[in-house]
Image (cartoon, rainbow, N blue to C red):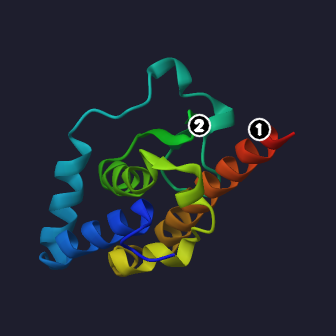
Amino acid sequence: MTTQTNKVLAKIDEWSENLALLEGHSRLEYLIDLARHSTTMDQSKRIEERLVTGCISKIWVDVIIESDTVKVEYDSDAMITKGITRIVCDCFNDSTVNECKGINPEDFLKLGIVELLTAQRRNGLGNLIATIISRFNQLTKETQQ
């Protein structure tokens, strides 16, 4: 898979280029600005089974596959976390099932967000990505049966 043919990897590249223009505190301010936009998850979907485990903040995610297109809805109760979640979910959104296959947490390292986070928040970011991938994999297995 190359970044030219894989929308997820192309979006990761795009976000990492945008974030690379900012340093330290400016990058955190940018994440907060992103969080000020509306989230994609309806209030009624913010339930326990959609919570990402192992995070300091609450993050809810829901993976949906419709007509071979992946959509990830999200919300969070903390601004920086919500900004980071928006970026991660955007990378998956509107990609095909095939483009999402094989994506792993290491693909997101180039965003340069990890360096801004405490150890616990780094765990949360990893858990967010792993949860999305796990739910995606579960849905694709269900549709193959």
Judging depth in this view, the residue of 84 and 94 nearest the camera is: 94
Instruction: Establish if 42 lies above or below 67.
Output: above
What residue is drawn where x is 22% and y is 49%?
Answer: 34
Judging depth in this view, the residue of 10 and 59 nearest the camera is: 10
Callout 2 crowding tier (Cα within 10 Å): few <14, some 14–19, many ≥20:
some
Mark on residue 65? 2
- Give percent across and percent down for residue 56: 52, 56
Judging depth in this view, the residue of 64 and 74 nearest the camera is: 64
What residue is drawn where x is 38% and y is 32%?
Answer: 40
**What residue sits right under mark 1 in the picture?**
143
Instruction: Establish if 116 lies above or below 132.
Output: below
Query: Which amino acid type is marked by label 2?
Result: Ile
Q: Is residue 139 left or right of residue 16?
A: right
Outermost residue, top direction?
44
For the C terminus, the image quarter is top right
Q: Which sits earlier in the primary sequence, circle 2 or circle 1?
A: 2
